Image (cartoon, grey):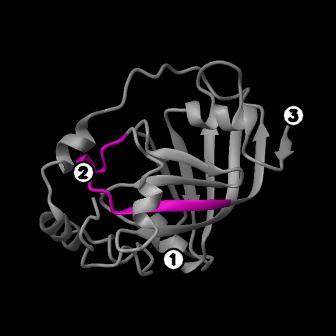
Amino acid sequence: MGKTHEHIDGRLRAFIEEQPVFFTATAPLGGDGTVNLSPKGLRGSFAVLDELTVAYLDFAGSNAETIAHLRENGRITLMWCAFQGAPNIVRVHGRGEPVLRDDPRFAELLGHFPDIDPTQHGLRAIIVVRAELVRDTCGYGVPFMAYDEDRDLHAKRFAREDDASLDAYFHKKEHIATSIDGLPGLPLPLPPAPF
């Protein structure tokens, strides 16, 4: 049933790149901390960088738990489920880091996402994950569900923001600069967009 993979390539790579949604899970080191599980979507916001490295665009939202947890300990799991076609679940367990807008690597990494306009979504970081364990398992219990299209609400909401107003938005949110558990989150003030 389950299989461990040495690399993210071939059929496995094709599978994860075809999925319209995936999930991220992170947690702080403290045993009483809050586990964070987030859905991620928007076509073009995920990329396989090499056979053991993946990345996704981290857009504006009401918290920054993933960034906070990665800054503290780097642990992350990504998961994709087949909601159509053959049943399959793929998990990438690894170490991640948020590459922030003022990082010299940001512009080069952004080049891996040519099919999405970063100015429309309040892009705040690129999450880069280095795989330590890659596994797929059956998805027999995952229901069939149809994908219609991406929602356009996120782009409509954040396309009207510039760097100053986006920074002001982040400052007003309780869990952007600091996580639910009090960990450092997104560093503020928000650096200017390099695009």
1 vs 2, front mark: 2
Which amino acid lies under the numbered mark 3 shown in the image of this protein? Answer: Met
Which amino acid lies under the numbered mark 1 shown in the image of this protein? Answer: Arg
The label on residue 129 is none
Q: Mark 3 points at which residue?
A: 1
Q: Which of 85 and 55 is in front in this view?
A: 55
The label on residue 119 is 2
Q: Which residue is drawn at 60% across and 60% down?
A: 129
> Looking at the picture, does residue 14 appear above or below residue 154?
above
Residue 146 appears at what percent x and percent y? 49, 19
Q: Name the residue under label 1.
A: 71
> Would residue 133 be counted in the magenta stretch?
no
Magenta stretch? 116-130
Which amino acid lies under the numbered mark 2 shown in the image of this protein? Answer: Thr
* Between discs 2 and 3, the one toward the N terminus: 3
Residue 115 appears at what percent x and percent y? 39, 38
> Looking at the picture, does residue 13 appear above or below residue 60?
above
Quarter occupied by residue 165: bottom left
